[in-house]
Image: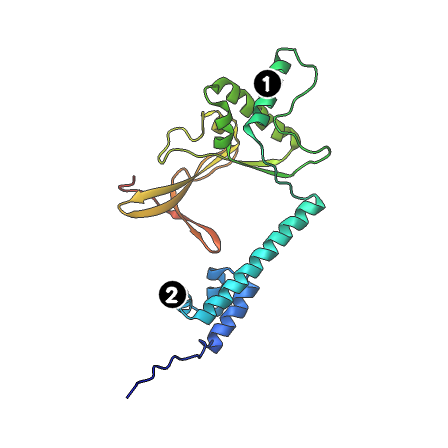
Amino acid sequence: MREKSEKSDKKPTLTKRMKDFLMIFENNMGLVGVSCKNSKVGQSTYYDWLGNKRFEEEISGIKTKVKDFGEHALFKLIKKGNLMLKRMSPFEIARSVEGMLEKEKGELLIDIDPVVLPEHYKPSIVVVDSLTAVASAFTGKDDSYRIYIEQLFRFFEKLGATSFLITETKQIPEVFSTTGVEEFLADGVVVMYNFKRGDIRENAIEVLKMRGEKHKKKIVASQITDDGMIVYPDQEVFGNTE
C-alpha cells in the first residue's frame, strides 16, 4: 500500500487586525513605530506577523511603494531646482586650492570659490558629506587643507545658508574633526557616539558647542528607530565603555 503525501496549496491568510494594520502602515509611509502606536499593535506582534508570508509580502510591497514615492519626490525637487546633489572629486578641490593660493599671492586677478555652484543658485541649506573625504585630497598638505576649509566656511557664510558638515572621528575623540580647525570655525558641534559596553553597542549624543546658546554639557543616551532619532536628555551615558 502506497501512502500519498499531500501538500497544502492554501496561501496564508490575513486576519482583520493584520489588514487594519497594513492600511495604517501605508498611511504612515511605512513607519513601524508610528503604525504600531496608532493601531495599538505591539512591535513584537508586528515582527511575529512577518512570519506570515502573505503579510510579509504586503509589507514589502508598501515599503517599495514608499521608496518609489520618496525617489519621485526627490526627482521632482531636483527638476524644480529646489535640490541639487553635487559630487566633488579630489582633483576639483586641488584645483580650487591652487587658485585660492594664487589669489592670495596676487598672481590671480579673479575670485575662486571653494565650490562651484550654478549661477543664481542660492541654497538655504547645504550638507557636506563628508569633510573626512575632502581631507583625503590633502594628504601631507595640512596647511592647504586648513586654507581650503576656512574658505569653505566663509563661502557658506556668504551664501547665507545653514550648513551641516559631517566628519568622522575616533571612537572617544579628543579632537572632533580632521585637524581641529573645523570645530573652531563652526557655530555648533554635535557629536554622535556608538559606545561598546561588553558585547552591546549603545548610541549617545552630545552638543559639544552651540555658539550663543545654553545647552546641557553632557553625553546623553539616544536611539535610532524606524521613526527617526530619539534623544533621552535625562539619561546619561557612563560606566565601562570602549
Q: What is the basis of the colouring in this image?
A: rainbow
Task: Identify residue for label 1.
Answer: 98
Placement of the N terminus among the 4 image quadrants: bottom left
In this picture, residue 64 sits left or right of residue 199: right
Mark nearer the viewer, 2 or 1: 1
Residue at 44%, 34% (x, y): give it. Answer: 168
> Residue 100 in the image: x percent, y percent?
61, 18
- Closer-to-camera residue (11/115): 11
Dot 1: element: helix
> Residue 213 in the image: x percent, y percent?
51, 36
Q: Is residue 153 above or below residue 228?
A: above
Residue 40 shows in the view: no
The amino acid at mark 2 is Ser
Q: Is residue 115 above or below residue 200?
A: above
Q: Residues within 10 Å of mark 2 (few under 14, many from 20)?
A: few
Task: Identify residue for label 2.
Answer: 44
The amino acid at mark 1 is Glu
Residue 36 shows in the view: yes
- Closer-to-camera residue (24/190): 24
Dot 2: element: helix
